[in-house]
Amino acid sequence: MMELPDTDSTPGERFTRSRLRPGYRAQDVDDFLTRAEAGLVTADEVERVQFVSTRLFSAGYDEEEMDEALEVLTRSLRRGSD
């Protein structure tokens, strides 16, 4: 089972919510990461995944924080496949 990096998110949420700027739609991210945690995605899939961006006043997950977490996940999956 894949463990994702810790973040400074609100308890009960995986990542920090964006405020007054676009973010990644939380449900899409959560669904993908649930599959990743179950070992059902590859490093290539993580590199190619694209999430829908939220509109200005609809908070999503912080895009920068998510992108960093996806990079960590990709490196971890690549190490595990060596």
Image (cartoon, rainbow, N blue to C red):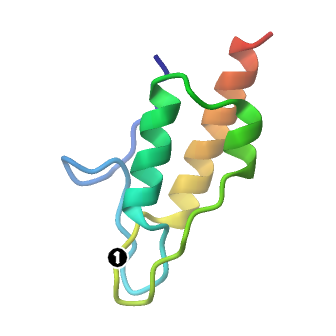
Q: Is residue 31 found left or right of 71 in the rendered image? A: left
- 24 versus 76 height, above or below: below
Which percent across, then down, holds residue 32? Answer: 50, 45
Q: In this orientation, which residue lies closer to the viewer: 73 or 39?
A: 39
Q: Quadrant of the C terminus?
A: top right
- Identify the residue shown where x is 39% and y is 45%: 7
Local crowd size for mark 1, using a 10 Å CA cut-off: few (<14), some (14–19), many (≥20)? many
Disc 1 is placed on an element classified as loop
Q: Is residue 5 visible?
A: no
Residue for point 53% across, 54% down = 66
Position of residue 9 in the picture relative to residue 30 (left or right): left
Residue type indicated by callout 1: Ala
Residue 31 can be seen in this image:
yes
Q: Nearer the viewer, residue 39 or 80?
A: 39
Q: Position of residue 24 (x, y in %)?
A: 49, 67
Query: Which residue does the numbered mark 1 point to in the structure image?
Result: 59
Q: Nearer the viewer, residue 51 or 72?
A: 51
The image quadrant of residue 79 is top right
Task: Say how many tags the image has.
Answer: 1
Residue 74 position, x and y percent, is: 69, 34
Query: Eyeballing the image, is 7 above or below 39?
Result: below
